[in-house]
Image (cartoon, rainbow, N blue to C red):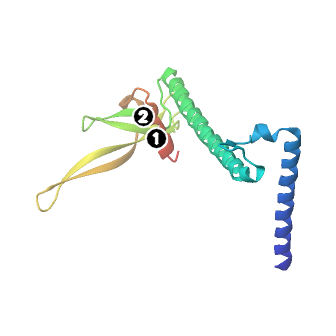
Amino acid sequence: LHSFVHSLAHLRSTRQNTVTMLTKIAEKLGILDVVAPWITGNEGIVSSDDTSNTRSQESADEIYARKLQAAEDRRYHLLNSQREAEERAKNHEKGSFVKRQRVLYHHRTEDEHYAAVVVGVHLDDGPENPYYTITYTKVEKHLKNNGNEEVKEVKVEKQTDPDRLTRVPWDEGKTWEIITNSPI
């Protein structure tokens, strides 16, 4: 245990020495003023001792900005990929659908239409005869023993043929919600 603690202390000291050395080199080359410029206050230039917190704050701000940009880039990429996949499927000769695509499902026995999402594409019968697994929410009404009506939202998952599905207009917000909330 003693040697482990000693090793950790040595690593920490070595890391601090490396950071200090690199900072001094950057300062001599004039790079530090570009990467982390000095902040001027009402009294003039702030000393290097006073800027350590400012520089680390700038660094934290830069890291946060990079994270935000990476998240926005990821969002753009995922939405763009989904939109392109939906366009390719639409232009397919049978007009197929893709995972995470918003559709309108026609329940023939109830003669109702439900907003649904494709969660599975199945090609068991060949690529020319796809079928789909969809999910949608429907409202069910039940009569309780006391005579009162109970209304419940029920999530339904079922397999269906493409002839029961209709495309809906692209909606970036709704599509992003599907992408972020779906495990597929």
Reading the image, the residue beneath label 2 is: 102
Amino acid type of the residue tagged 2 in the rendering: Arg
Gap in angstroms between the C-alphas marked 2 and 1: 9 Å
Q: Earlier in the sequence, mark 2 or mark 1?
A: 2
Q: Secondary structure at mark 1?
A: helix
Please tell me which residue is depicted at 56% across the width and 29% down the height of the picture: 80
Residue 141, percent across and down?
20, 50
Q: Nearer the viewer, residue 2 or 81?
A: 2
Residue 117, percent across and down?
42, 38
Q: Quadrant of residue 109?
A: top left
Q: Is residue 133 left or right of residue 72?
A: left
Q: Secondary structure at mark 2?
A: strand
Q: Is residue 29 left or right of residue 93?
A: right
Q: Quadrant of the N terminus?
A: bottom right
The nearer-to-camera label among 2 and 1 is 1
User: Vertically, is 9 above or below 99?
Assistant: below
Please tell me which residue is depicted at 50% across the width and 33% down the height of the picture: 98
User: Vertically, is 165 above or below 144?
Assistant: above
User: How many numbered circles does the render carry?
Assistant: 2
Q: Is residue 154 left or right of residue 99?
A: left
Is residue 159 among what the camera can see?
A: yes
Q: Nearer the viewer, residue 141 or 43?
A: 43
User: Vertically, is 8 above or below 69?
Assistant: below
- Could you classify mark 1 by the number of other residues whose Cα lies within 10 Å: few (under 14), some (14-19), or many (20 or more)? some
Residue 54, percent across and down?
68, 49
Tell me whether circle 2 and circle 1 mark residues in contact (CB < 8 Å).
Answer: yes
Which numbered tag is attached to residue 158? none
Amino acid type of the residue tagged 1 in the rendering: Ile
Reading the image, the residue beneath label 1 is: 178
